[in-house]
Image: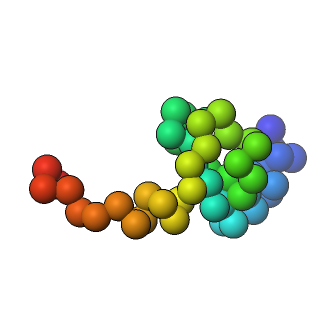
């Protein structure tokens, strides 16, 4: 597990996708089960519920 941490850190640092199911972030959407673009999340307008 420790050996994979640097790789994981790189993936998170360069993450362009986040998994809607488990919340993981990755640069490659193939690493995620329900990938969605981070950019698309940022483009969501503020919700009245927030
Ligand atoms: Zn997932």
In x, y percent, where is residue 15? Answer: 65, 60
Name the residue at the left extreme: 48
Residue at point 72%, 58% (across, down): 27
- For residue 34, side relative to residue 1 (left or right): left
In this rendering, is residue 18 above or below 9?
above
Quarter, ligand 1: top right
Residue 9 seen anywhere in this rendered image of the structure:
no
Task: Please state which of residues 5 and 44 is positioned toward the viewer in this rendering.
Answer: 44
Q: Quadrant of residue 34?
A: top right
Quadrant into which the N terminus falls:
top right
Task: Evaluate whether residue 43 shows in this view.
Answer: yes
Is residue 8 or residue 41 the one in the foreground?
A: 41
Q: Is residue 44 left or right of residue 50?
A: right
Q: Decide if residue 50 is on the left or right side of residue 19.
A: left
Q: Residue at x 44, y 58 (%)?
A: 41
- Depicted 22 relative to depicted 41: above or below: above
5 vs 20, nearest the viewer: 20
- Colour pattern: rainbow
User: Which residue, as the protein is rendered here, is positioned at the far right?
Assistant: 3
Measured as percent of width and height from the top left, residue 9 is found at: 71, 58
For the C terminus, the quadrant is: bottom left
Judge whether 46 appears above or below 31 on screen: below
Q: Residue at x 57, y 56 (%)?
A: 37
Residue, x 40% and y 66% (percent of image)? 43
Q: Position of residue 13 (x, y in %)?
A: 66, 65
């Amino acid at each position: 597990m420790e050996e994979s941490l640097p790789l994981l850190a790189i993936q998170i640092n360069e993450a362009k996708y986040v998994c809607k199911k488990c919340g993981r972030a990755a640069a490659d959407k193939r690493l995620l089960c329900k990938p969605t673009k981070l950019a698309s999340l940022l483009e969501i307008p503020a919700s009245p519920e927030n």
